[in-house]
Amino acid sequence: MLNVVALMGRLVADPELRHTPQGVSVTTFTIAVDRSFVRQGEQRQADFIDIVCWRSSAEFVCKYFQKGSLIAVNGSIQTRTYQDKNGNNRKAFEIVADNVHFASSKSGGNPGTGSYAPRQEVPREAAQEAPSYSAGSNEDFAVIDDGEDLPF
């Protein structure tokens, strides 16, 4: 059996972090995914797909993504049945995300265009300083003789 989904789209609203009674982080959000086919003379249609993220993925999405952000999701389709207010049986389809990724460049400065700034400020004490690689010299590298056959 195979149940694999890969989607890329834009969030239609800011995701909100919730917790189960057992304290597990969860978020649900909807992304707009453009259809690949466009009829001549018509505008491109979009599908609105519900996504569920659990645990650290949910926290990641809520911290770094907001309405309009381009997001890539891979996971699987899950269905569930429920009764609506009128007692009618309904079926819901949603994507349970295994992995969530940024799908736009970091250079866009305004929200919704790829800005990766966290939505909540991280204390300076928690941030680790990145190592500096500018202190190296050319002597750290060896010259490769490309006249020989490659070993692979």
Image: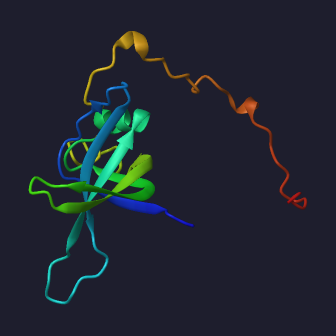
Q: Which residue: 40% across, 9% down?
A: 125
Q: Which residue: 90% across, 62% down?
A: 149
Residue nearer the viewer, 78 or 75: 78
> In this rendering, is residue 22 above or below 52?
above
Q: Which residue: 26% across, 25% down?
A: 120
**What x and y, as percent, mark residue 21?**
32, 26
Quarter occupied by residue 126: top left
Furthest-bottom residue in this view: 40
**What x and y, as percent, mark residue 138?**
70, 33
Look at the image and tell me in which quarter the N terminus lies: bottom right
Q: Which residue: 14% across, 84% down?
A: 42
Furthest-top residue in this view: 125
Quarter occupied by residue 40: bottom left
Look at the image and tell me in which quarter the C terminus lies: bottom right
**What x and y, as percent, mark residue 119?**
25, 30
Residue nearer the viewer, 133 or 138: 133
Residue nearer the viewer, 4 or 139: 4
> In this rendering, is residue 104 above or below 119?
below
> In this rendering, is residue 122 above or below 25?
above
Count of marks placed on residues: 0
Q: Is residue 110 left or right of residue 128?
A: left
Q: Is residue 147 left or right of residue 131?
A: right
